[in-house]
Amino acid sequence: MKTRIYIATILSMIIAVVVFGVGAAIVLTIGGVDGADAYGLAVAAIVAFIVSPIAGWIMAPHLRARFERRRSSPEV
């Protein structure tokens, strides 16, 4: 379980950056009212903060499973 937490933490940081970057690009591309940009960037940051740990926790076992398969296969 400890390894899953480490993998999920690293993944969540990467996912947070990507999700915020996509959200910021969308907010800045749409461009609307002058005050809406700050609100949109705040929403993008909050969404990235909420979504990234969940996605990291879901993806972590898949990365570990690949390592375990390789490690447990008999060498010829």
Image (cartoon, rainbow, N blue to C red):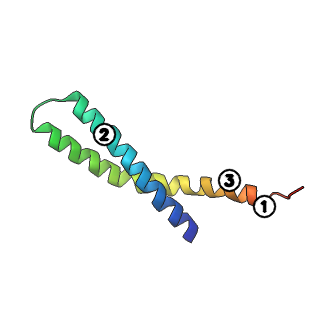
Quarter of the image that includes the C terminus = bottom right
Q: Alpha carbon of mark 2 to alpha carbon of mark 1: how far?
A: 40 Å
Residue, x 21% and y 48% (percent of image)? Answer: 42
> Which type of secondary structure does the marked residue at label 3 adopt?
helix
Label 3 is placed on what type of residue?
Arg
Label 1 near label 3: C-beta < 8 Å? Answer: no
Q: Quadrant of residue 22?
A: top left
Mark 2, secondary structure of its residue: helix
Q: Is the residue under label 1 in contact with that under label 2 (CB below 8 Å)?
A: no
Q: Which residue is mark 3?
A: 66
Residue 23: assigned label: 2
| Res 30 label | none
**Spatial CA span between label 3 and label 1:** 10 Å
Q: Position of residue 28 (x, y in %)?
A: 23, 33
Q: Position of residue 14 (x, y in %)?
A: 43, 51
| Helix, strand or loop status at disc 1 | helix
Which residue was labeled with disc 1? Answer: 72
- Residue 35, percent across and down? 9, 39
Task: Count numbered badges in the picture.
Answer: 3
Q: At which x and y percent is residue 74?
A: 85, 58
